Image (cartoon, rainbow, N blue to C red):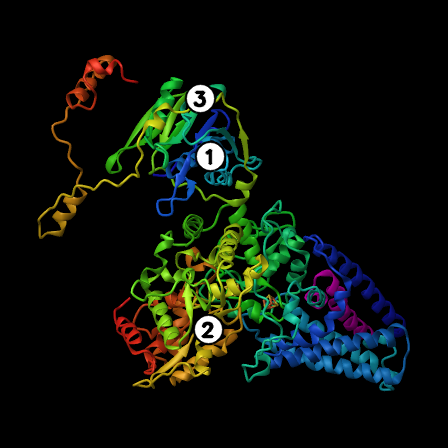
Amino acid sequence: MTQPDNVTVGAAVKTVALVSSGRHPVSGRAGRAREDARAVEMGLSLSGGTLTLLHAGDADDAALPEYLGMYHGLSAGAGPGRLDLLPMAPDGDALPALAARLRQSDARLVLTGQRAECGEGSGMLPYLLAETLGWSIATGIAAIEQCDGDHVTVLQALPQGQRRRLEVALPCLLAVDGVAPAPRQSAFGPARRGITDSVATAAPAADPGWAAWQWQPARARPKRLKVVKSTNARDRFKAAAAKSAASGGQVLTDLAPDEAADRLLAYLRSEKVLAPVSDAEGADQ
Amino acid sequence: MLQTLLPILIFAALAVGAVGAARRIRLWRRGQRSPMGWHRLVRMPKRYLNDLHHIVARDKAMAHTHVATAGGFVAAMALALVVHGFGWRNPILGGLLLLASLGMFVGALAVNRRRLDPPAKLSKGPWQRLSKSLLAYSVGMFLVSLPLVGVAPTTLGGGALALVLTLLVAWGLLEMIVGMGWGGPMKHAFAGSLHLAFHRRPERFDDQHGEPQSKIPHDVHRGSRSTALFPLDLAAPKLGVEKPSDFQWEQLLGFDACVQCGRCQAVCPAYAAGQPLNPKKLIQDMVVGMVGGSDARYAGSAYPGIEVGKHRGAPAEPIVPQLVEAETLWACTTCRACVEECPMMIEHVDAIVDMRRFVTLERGETPEKGAAAIDNLIATDNPGGLDNASRLDWAADLDIPRIQDRPEGVDVLLWLGDGAFDMRNQRTLRSLVKILRAGGVDFAVLGDEERDSGDVARRLGDEATFQRLAERNIATLSRYRFQRIVTADPHSFHVLGREYGAFGGHYTVRHHSTFIAELFDAGRLHVKAAEQRETVTYHDPCYLGRYNGEFAAPRQVLAALGVEFAEMERSGYRSRCCGGGGGAALSDVPGKARIPDMRMEDVRETGASTVAVACPQCTAMLEGVVEPRPQIKDLAEMVAEALIEPASDTASPTATADTREEIPA
Ligand code: SF4
Ligand code: SF4
């Protein structure tokens, strides 16, 4: 899926890309995160040099110049890349700082990856941020098809290469998927010229949960293999490539939002994903 | 009438030529200034008569032609100035002038004969005209000077003949003197001599390190091999060359010296493979950019597949893509065949890498696979993105000593290079280890502390990544003690030996072919004669041969093995590149043929059944040629196969090492 070339908004819709520090899968060195780099790529092709980057964390992170090094191949006269840095210790909670900064700015479109490659990497940040700001959110974005002042039309990536077209109202937060167009090369010259503005934030709150958690390295979960006993290569291939067919599902349509939410909650409780009602009241939602 | 006209003509030509020359100098000075001293001009005559002539003389006929024509012209012009210009009509001087014009005439005849059916590498256009102008000048000058020695004094005094002769001399002066300053073909004499004086690589003229390896005197390289790329100041406001005016002025001067002889074009592997690169056209495009205008007036061979006349340049305009397409730059394998061949000592590779630096460092437009390799180098210290700790996996059973365990130091640090990750090259490395053991060499490796040398990053223009790798490798090496570094990779050999010096890393580095030859010389290796005699040829790797002048050792090793040796037509300093250097294997610019296929054709012509190689990159490129083809073996593999393990050695460890060797790597 390639980004349609002609979709640009320039400075009309103020666009910000959230960037985090990536970890190389082999060496563990800091660098661009796979999805965040795609978010920046999407932002650069949409808004050109007016895209601003935003990062909460360590100013000396090696990943930051790599993002700034992507500011090339833009329209003539585009200045150096700009990154707003919200200084924060690794155990700080990025959410309040990011939300405050975005509220101050006139940003209307925020692009980010879906999940950080280090730290908690819970994948919750885009949702929590959109909730805090009261913005719309769409995740799994593969491409932006159109953007006017009020709406953005995007393609959302679904399993097995399927795409779904969504129209999202601005302001919104788009979490970019790994299938989005590959990021451009990070070049040393633009990286060196990029400007990092350290933005003082109100005493970054320490994340209360952080200290209490128990940490252990992530391990890839083994995949369940469906062994197909067939002498026929075609059958084996079909079995391997087949969609894991969801069985027994139920498609809910034409429900009022509240009713739909209730049905989902009831389902999640029945599956014991959510605690029964009495406990949920006290939980931090 | 002639006596009044000639001085006017001569002085007018000199004056107008001087004005043109001054303008030309201003063009060169649009380049970046570097400290210069006029005293360097004194170097020029020696460099011209010795170094330049030496290269020209690789083409005997052309050398003689040039000596006659240029020598005749310079003498005739100087004498004409005295005799006709200042009117000192001395018969002896007149006689000398006649002789000089005669010499020039003979040379001009040879030039014209060559130009009747010019070889494809030559440019036509003004260069065709020059051959006629040479005739005009020499004939005109001869005839107008005849009266000086008393021949035909009366008939030449006036009339139509005098007019004709005046016109001939005028034509000659216009081409030779005015054209020299105003950018005609003769500008090569003016720019060329200054280029020799202000060459950026003075080591090329130092007469050191002559390699007494060739029987043919002009094949011997005279000066030092100055082949390390110039370090780039990473704090400079602009990195690399974007516009013609970003070149150093000496480089612009050098481009202007080109005589469009096409020797570079004739040896360029990318050109031969139909990739869109022609070093001669590239240099001419640089001149177009320096002067400003279009390439439509270029009268030589185009970049294959790119039409002439569609590109324009100006000193302050970007070069890529208005003047030169990026793919032209990426097609170069940095093999230096062009530089080695160029009689004007122009540095094509420096220019190409300078422009690549801008494309990579400022524009971020390295070809896709090249960019991926650079990203991997940044993240994992090797271009494949592999776990650096797996660098020694191939040697798990070999028990290779680590230098970390040898604080007292070792004799030889074995530098593995990125070939350590490649299964084909691992066979070579295992063979090399076997040889080192058989020779009783005290060696160790860095293991996972070794990083890529930075060669590919640097040739792809990423000087930042190169310098980072260089600094880290130098820091690592400074922690250990060793006498010298031995490596089977000519690229590492070149970079460690020649390019790290600028960053404070000074080492004695030996290529494994050199080191094995030394072991043979010292009588430390014993080989058995091959069972069946087969014919072997040897492919000189660019970074071993042209870059570092090691042509002899690999041949010595083959001689020690007692194989039947057949030399390829293009071998030694004229070896044809395998196509894998300079990141060209990564940028993989499409052409009509593949460079390794063409090289394999060269191999086949010798009738050899094996081609000996001495570089992991050459091995990979040549093995990529479809079978049936001669087999490819590294020198180390050939030696290891023929080794007789010393029986006196403590029997058991050698024996086990030997049996292990049977296990395929
Ligand atoms: S660059 Fe050198 S070899 Fe090539 S055409 Fe010019 S003078 Fe000849
Ligand atoms: S270095 Fe080799 S490939 Fe590059 S232009 Fe010169 S001859 Fe051609």
- Which secondary structure is most common in the magenta stretch? helix
Q: Secondary structure at mark 1?
A: helix
Gap in angstroms between the C-alphas marked 3 and 1: 17 Å
| Residue nearest the viewer, comparing B579 with B383 | B383
**Point 87% across, 72% down: residue:** B85
Q: Amino acid at mark 1?
A: Leu
Label 1 neighbour load within 10 Å: few <14, some 14-19, many 20+: many
Gap in angstroms between the C-alphas marked 3 and 2: 63 Å
**Which quadrant of the frame does ligand 1 lie within?**
bottom right
Circles 2 and 1: CB distance less than 8 Å?
Answer: no
Q: Amino acid at mark 3?
A: Gly
Residue tagged 1: A44
Residue tagged 3: A149
Chain letter belonging to callout 3: A
On screen, residue B411 above or below B557: above
Residue tagged 2: B540
**Point 16% across, 47% down: residue:** A237
Q: How many labels were placed on the picture?
A: 3
Chain letter belonging to callout 2: B
Are labels 3 and 2 on one chain? no
Q: Secondary structure at mark 2?
A: loop
Label 2 neighbour load within 10 Å: few <14, some 14-19, many 20+: many
* Stretch in magenta: B162-190
Q: Is residue B204 left or right of residue A196?
A: right
Q: Position of residue A28 (x, y in %)?
A: 38, 44
Image quadrant where residue B651 sits: bottom left
